[in-house]
Amino acid sequence: MHVVAAGIQDRDGGGRPLLWTRIDHPSAQKIWADQGFAGRLVDWTAPILSRELEIVRKDPGQRGFQVQPRRWAIERTFAWRTAHRRLARDHETIPARSETMIRCAMIGIMVRRLTRSRPASRPGPRPLSHTNRRDPQARSQRSRPSTVWRSA
């Protein structure tokens, strides 16, 4: 994972992270990217990195929101990361510090999953319970305050 400064266009700043991806993950032959990386970066990736950069595009006739293929995995990961307080807002001014905070958050997520004794599951809908209602007998037996405060 590599963070690029926000002032740099995706297609202009994408070369360095792609180089690091080749070094960090030499077996990865195909890389999926967002539409922001389209353009000369796709042409540069094939001869320089010997990798295929595929741009995930939305359907031309799409109206409104639809889940794009392979995009849901990235959005899910962003959702996991924002559960960490430091990553809820982007206050970091140095990209290396942002990378470090993201790595720490992802390590925490992985450790939690590895130490879990059972598979993750979502709780189903809870049945409505009437335990919060007060007993009418108990209501009549409550004592009233003995002191009444009045304004002078």
Image (tube, grey):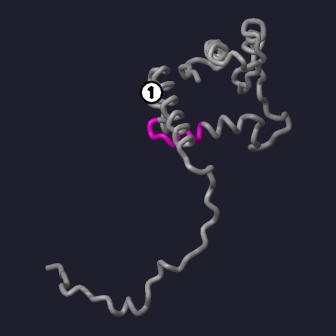
Question: Farthest top residue?
Answer: 48
Q: Looking at the image, which residue is at 61% across and 37% down?
A: 77
Q: Looking at the image, which residue is at 57% across and 21% down?
A: 2
Q: Looking at the image, which residue is at 64% across and 20% down?
A: 10
Image height of 76 relative to 120, above or below: above
Q: Looking at the image, which residue is at 65% across and 38% down?
A: 75
Q: Is residue 145 left or right of residue 9?
A: left
- As helix, strand or loop, the secondary structure at mark 1 comes to loop
* Residue 4 screen position, x and y as percent: 56, 20
Question: Farthest front residue?
Answer: 117
Give the magenta range.
78-86
Image height of 127 relative to 111, above or below: below
In this orientation, does residue 13 appear? no
In this orientation, does residue 97 appear? yes
* Residue 108 screen position, x and y as percent: 50, 37
* Residue 98 screen position, x and y as percent: 49, 26
* Residue 5 screen position, x and y as percent: 53, 20
Image height of 136 relative to 108, above or below: below
Residue under label 1: 92
Q: Does the magenta stretch include residue 83?
A: yes
At label 1, the amino acid type is Glu
Decide: few, some or many residues near mark 1? Use Cα within 10 Å; few <14, some 14-19, many ≥20: few
Question: Farthest left residue?
Answer: 152
Q: Is residue 105 left or right of residue 75?
A: left
Image height of 100 relative to 15, above or below: below
What secondary structure characterizes most of the magenta part? helix
Residue 25 figure quarter? top right
Quadrant where the N terminus lies? top right
